[in-house]
Image (spheres, grey):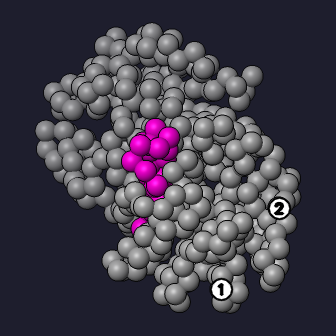
Amino acid sequence: MLVGIPSLSDNDRFGDYREDVLNHIKRALVGVQYEVFVTPPGRKVGIEGIADRCNNLVEKALSEGFDFLWIVQADVQVPHDAFEKLSAFDVDVAQGVVPRHDDPNAFIAGFMDENMKVWYLPRNAVEGMVLSGWIFAGMSCTLIARRVLEAGIRFRYQSGVGEDILFMFDVQKAGFVAKVDGRVLCGHLPEWPLATYIPKQIRRNAVFGVLDVGCGHRPKGDVNVDLFVEATAHRAADQRVNDDVRLKVAEIPNFVRADACCLPFRDRGFRKVYSWHLIEHLGKPEDFLAECCRVADEEIEVRCPNGDPNWAYGLAAYDETKPLHLHRLTREWFELNLKSYLAWDWIVHFDYSQSEPWEIVVEGYRKDVYD
């Protein structure tokens, strides 16, 4: 897939948003093969220039064999599930929605007729809805199948009519099927960034369930992360002997290979972050806690061996057979290091399911959710 960002100038205001826009695209395309292309400046300006740059994206998509062109405008933040939702329609053109710059309750979305007359819809008629028929929603977040481009449909300029309306008119007049997904609410910079524009309850409904970090052979998450796909001594009972086996990635739901201290997910992207016996293997356990707090929307659960040397298990978990347990973590260590995360309420306790407190359990609850 080609992700295309039309750009009229190297020095326009949109350049300030570029890194942020790209980060949102990256989080929406975890596990998807794609290339991002920002068009070079053209000689035309205004709406005519936008149409020209969009056609530059079309030609690249066709000439280089891409199956889809996903146009994301340079001031738009796509939500993490944008591509997942749009591609699931399996239609010719699928669009997300953005608010107008001057009014968050007015969306750039509506219906048109065969004479190109348009009716814009208010936010409450679009949000959460899927629109079919002769529809349009700007070009802010538009997924286009290759077959549309192969049919010769291009962006065009006509005085007094937006290039987005013309394109969607031509698409539907040619018999192609389009949908507008009012569940794909995008941020529109600078007035309506995604983090503050999307109402809290909608944002919560948009997050994934459980993220299991360091899932190993026993994944528990809706999305599961591990750094090591090949056999590793980190998962061995005696870490001096690597008797582990390769992860069966195809059998792990939504597996993502990633570093636990640099997770490729958006802020508050998961209802809960869960981790079992990972943090003691990390060079900087504090960085991992920070990532958990960033990615979790509601809850955190981190479990690790009790490192207190006053208990037998606290000695065994960090003896000569465990050279990859880099930190002797204790309940006191967690209580001290969690104090800086003021947005969270913390409970640190022992698991007594065995004959002694063999495991430390850290539970976090985000205050703005549970207060």
User: What's under tag 1, amino acid-wise?
Assistant: Phe
The span picked out in magenta is 1-30
Q: Of label 2 and label 1, which has the lower sequence position? A: 2
Vertical order, 171 against 128 (above or below): below
Q: Is 219 in front, or is 115?
A: 115
Q: CA distance from mark 2 to mark 1?
A: 21 Å
Q: Position of residue 247 (x, y in %)?
A: 31, 58
Residue under numbered circle 1: 176
Above or below, comparing residue 181 to residue 292 in the picture: below
Number of residues whose C-alpha sits closer than 10 Å to that of mark 2, classed few (under 14), some (14–19) or many (20 or more)? some
Q: Nearer the viewer, residue 48 or 245?
A: 48
Q: Nearer the viewer, mark 2 or mark 1?
A: 2
Q: Quadrant of the N terminus?
A: bottom left
Circle 2/circle 1 CB separation < 8 Å = no
Q: Quadrant of the C terminus?
A: top right
Looking at the picture, tell me which residue is in the foreground, 352 or 101.
101
- On screen, residue 207 versus residue 5, left or right, reads right
Res 323 visible: yes
Residue 108: give x, y in percent of width and height.
73, 57
In the rendered image, residue 134 lying in the magenta stretch gets the answer no
- Place residue 263 in its image quadrant: top left
**Residue where numbered disc 2 is placed:** 120
State yes or no: residue 24 in magenta. Answer: yes
Q: In x, y percent, where is residue 5?
A: 46, 58
Closer-to-camera residue (270/115): 115
Return the residue found at the far left.
Answer: 240
The residue located at (54%, 79%) in the rendering is: 154
Q: Residue 168 at what x, y percent from top left? A: 67, 75
**Judging from the image, what secondary structure is the residue with disc 1 in?**
loop
Residue 223 in view (yes/no): no
Q: Amino acid at mark 2?
A: Tyr
Q: Quarter of the image holding residue 126?
A: bottom right
